[in-house]
Amino acid sequence: MHLGEIRQFVSHLESLRAPRLARQREIGRLILPSRGLFQGEDAENPREANLFNPAANRALRKAAAGMTQAVTPASVPWFRHAFLRREDREATGGNEYVDAVDALLRAVLAAGGFYRAIHAFNKELLAFGCALLGCEESARTVARCFCQTCGTYCVALDADGNLDAVARRLLMTPRELADRFGADRLSRIAREKLESRPYDPVPVRHVTQRRAERDPERKDHGNMPWGSWWYEENGADFLAESGFRSMPFFFTVWEEARGVYGAGPGDEALADQKGIESWEMRKAVGVEKMIDPPLVSQGPLKAFVDTSAGALIPSSGFGAGDALKPLYEVNFGPAIQHVQREIDQIAMRLEDVMMANVFANMSLETRPAGMTMTEYMDRRRRSAELMGPTVSGYEPRVLSPLLERIFGLLDEAGLLPRPPQGLSPFASLNVSYQSPMAQMLEQSGAVAIQNLFDLAAPLLGIVPEAADKIDFEQAIDELAQRLGVPASVIRSDEAVAALRQERAEARQAQEQQAAQAQMLQQMVALGNVKTQGSLAGELLSAKQAAGAEAGPEQGGEAA
């Protein structure tokens, strides 16, 4: 593609986003001043919100922290891979291989800044209704994750709602550009800045788009499934033209009903935040009038009025009626209390709108004092079920493709462990999520299995044959899966079969030895066994000989 075609494509995407951008700019000003960078704003000069009461921002931060802890906690493993086919899962060494892969993926995520990026991603998703996560290749950490802030990107989706193109606007220093693309690729203005002002930001564009025409047999950058183009906004040529094997960006929306860029809790909270600002302004005016009310003066005293603290006003020459008095006698106290109650109600409503309480319940790691375990588990489970449909697009559109991309980068770098022997030619890994929210949803199935056992126990006491209806070993596998038990703890069916075979052979050998020993004792006692050459034979022969010598004497005495 030519630079002119890329510029025209970016302009087209920006025109499609323009109607939504005005609303997001307002959300950024009133709800999330720390995020978002819109056209005409300077990254080095933070947006001045001038908020009297940032209640929506506080609720947003609380909700984002709870969402991060509930979906992708850094403290515990929140995902787990397993072979898709059962015969592959039961292969020897399969569980150890999966555990090694998961440990490697978690190490790359931690080193590549994923948890910092996903927290920013959650804040933008809650506020602006959409968010974009990026994962670049890194020579030091294999992968580097970042959140592209609102106002600096445009996207295009395919028929399935997946990313088809991403156009980003970045501010990069001339030194960054020279290190990444080479000084000879820079424009004249950027080269001049590189010599005199190497850290003066330069506006840069990056476009990633699915390639419609390519040769799959060729593996060069120009024939990758995803094309990548870099250029300066004022440049005359590309800084770089390359490609990716997999899409390096991941996009999702909170609610899809409002178009490509969706809508989120920030849209609902905007009116309440405006209202709380209005009430805070009225309260401030009332308090100011209580502290420093407007005054009225009679007669010539007005020429000597000084209301500053510690002022001395001469009284000679003035009558008693010339004293300063408030312009009006109004008791602002009850009115201010009423305003404060309204502010508190709006703040509580913002907590609900931003889902702060819901995510806080899911992220509870310890049971609060005075709450029973049943209440604790029920609250977490109901919160997870409430947010399950909303976050359902989060995993397949962001987390799963992110893990696939990091897995591919590890494979290209040759850092993956060697797969075990005995896998089928079609062996593939499937990811399942073990986050607190996923566990709460999975535990609903575990509770169902437990309820089945509890209800079936009395019946099995009456009809023991009914136990044949339940596959207890499969039930153990299901419980372990739903409770997030590590794969290395549960033996595969192949390992269980081998263990049982070994145990049966040992038991059979013991039984044979016991039977042989018992038979030998019986035959020795009867004297009907051929024992020549054995210790038992010598003892038996000696006993028989002693009996023959004593026989005549015993017979004579008897006679």
Image (cartoon, helix red, strand yellow):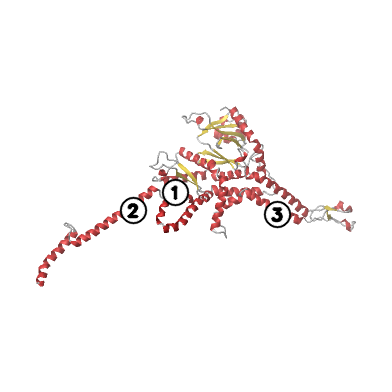
Q: In this orientation, does residue 125 appear? A: yes
x and y percent of residue 557 in the render? 10, 72
Farthest front residue in view: 463
Residue at screen point 29% across, 54% down: 509
Q: Label 2 belongs to which residue?
A: 503
- Nearer to us in this view, 379 or 417: 379
Q: Helix, strand or loop at disc 3?
A: helix
- Nearer to us in this view, 315 or 266: 266
Q: Label 1 belongs to which residue?
A: 487
Marks 3 and 2, the one that precedes in the sequence = 3
> From mark 2 to mark 1, how far is it between C-alphas?
23 Å
Q: Label 3 belongs to which residue?
A: 341
Badges 3 and 2: C-beta atoms under 8 Å apart?
Answer: no
x and y percent of residue 109 in the render? 51, 44
Q: Amino acid at mark 2?
A: Arg
- Nearer to us in this view, 478 or 1: 478
The answer to whether residue 381 is above or below residue 44 is: below
- Nearer to us in this view, 356 or 462: 462
The answer to whether residue 544 is above or below residue 189 is: below
Q: Amino acid at mark 3?
A: Arg
Q: Helix, strand or loop at disc 2?
A: helix
The answer to whether residue 56 is above or below residue 175 is: below
Which quadrant is the C terminus positioned in? bottom left
Mark 2 Cα-neighbour bin, 10 Å: few <14, some 14–19, many ≥20:
few
Q: Amino acid at mark 1?
A: Ala
Q: With 229 as the anchor, is 456 left or right in this view?
A: left
The answer to whether residue 497 is above or below residue 368 is: above
